[in-house]
């Protein structure tokens, strides 16, 4: 299965996908896309000879010239994804909203990893440490990553898989982030594998992982 991974920074989830023994013969990463002009995740991609692309413009309003100066536009990206025969888009830290036409083009074939248990602690502005801070401040006793389908708004698509970790004894948001990240690196490759095997189906309102 050919996939594209959308990142923004560190790239530890990208690394987990690349490192996964179970995925090695199942997937091929055709491109890594970021909303930044450069980021550590790009270095990881390049060291594995995976092409990298930056999204250089907002969804509308910028001239094509500006797109060229700073990266590719979403419409150029959409063409690229088709040329590469990408079958699954994996968002791992990507911060821009995906335009509707790409969502429609990839209906139920775009997944995102969120570092908290949705539908709580999601939505606009809920990324990075602010998620873990909100979880910490709420005094929640469990947290964990959610992998979900991407729809037109932030963090509202149907949930595919989640994992829980006890956080009753933590003393900082950073400690929650560390525990959750460990689980992210397990759950994301797991879901991608299930996808590649055709073991994710939608039955009525529920996503079933076989
Ligand atoms: C992860 O915590 C992921 O859940 C969130 O953004 C972060 C990306 O981390 N959506 P990394 O770049 O994969 O290390």
Image (cartoon, grey):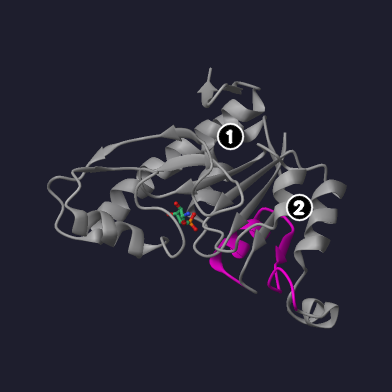
Magenta range: 38-61
Name the residue tied to disc 2: 101
| Residue 88 at x, y percent in the picture | 69, 40
Relative to 199, 70 lies left or right: right
The picture places residue 130, in percent across and down from the top left corner, at 34, 64
Q: Residue furthest top?
A: 210
Instruction: Identify which residue is drawn at 73% across, 79% down.
Output: 70
**Marked residue nearer the N-terminal end (1 or 2):** 2
- Residue 48 falls inside the magenta stretch: yes
Instruction: Classify 27 as above or below 13.
Output: above
Asked if the beta carbon under badge 2 is closer than 8 A to the nearest atom of ligand 1, the reply is: no
Q: Return the mark for residue 130.
A: none
Query: Which SS class for mark 2?
Result: helix
Which quadrant holds residue 96? bottom right
Across and down, in percent, residue 113 comes to 49, 46
Which residue does the image show at 82% across and 77% down from the upper left? 68
């Amino acid at each position: 299965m050919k996939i594209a991974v959308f990142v923004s920074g560190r790239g530890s989830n990208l690394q987990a996908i690349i490192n996964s023994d179970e995925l090695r013969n199942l997937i091929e990463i055709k491109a890594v896309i970021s909303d930044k002009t450069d980021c550590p995740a790009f270095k990881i991609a390049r060291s594995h000879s995976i092409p990298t692309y930056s999204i250089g413009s907002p969804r509308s309003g910028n001239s094509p010239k500006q797109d060229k100066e700073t990266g590719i536009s979403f419409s150029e990206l959409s063409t690229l994804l088709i040329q590469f025969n990408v079958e699954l888009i994996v968002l791992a830290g990507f911060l821009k909203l995906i335009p509707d036409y790409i969502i429609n083009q990839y209906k139920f074939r775009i997944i995102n990893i969120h570092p908290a248990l949705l539908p709580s602690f999601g939505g606009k502005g809920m990324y990075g440490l602010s998620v873990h801070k909100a979880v910490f401040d709420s005094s929640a006793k469990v947290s964990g990553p959610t992998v979900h389908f991407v729809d037109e708004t932030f963090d509202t698509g149907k949930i595919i898989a989640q994992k829980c970790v006890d956080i009753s004894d933590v003393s900082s948001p950073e400690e929650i982030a560390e525990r959750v990240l460990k689980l992210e690196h397990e759950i994301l490759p797991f879901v991608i594998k299930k996808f590649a095997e055709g073991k994710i189906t939608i039955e009525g309102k529920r996503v079933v992982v076989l």
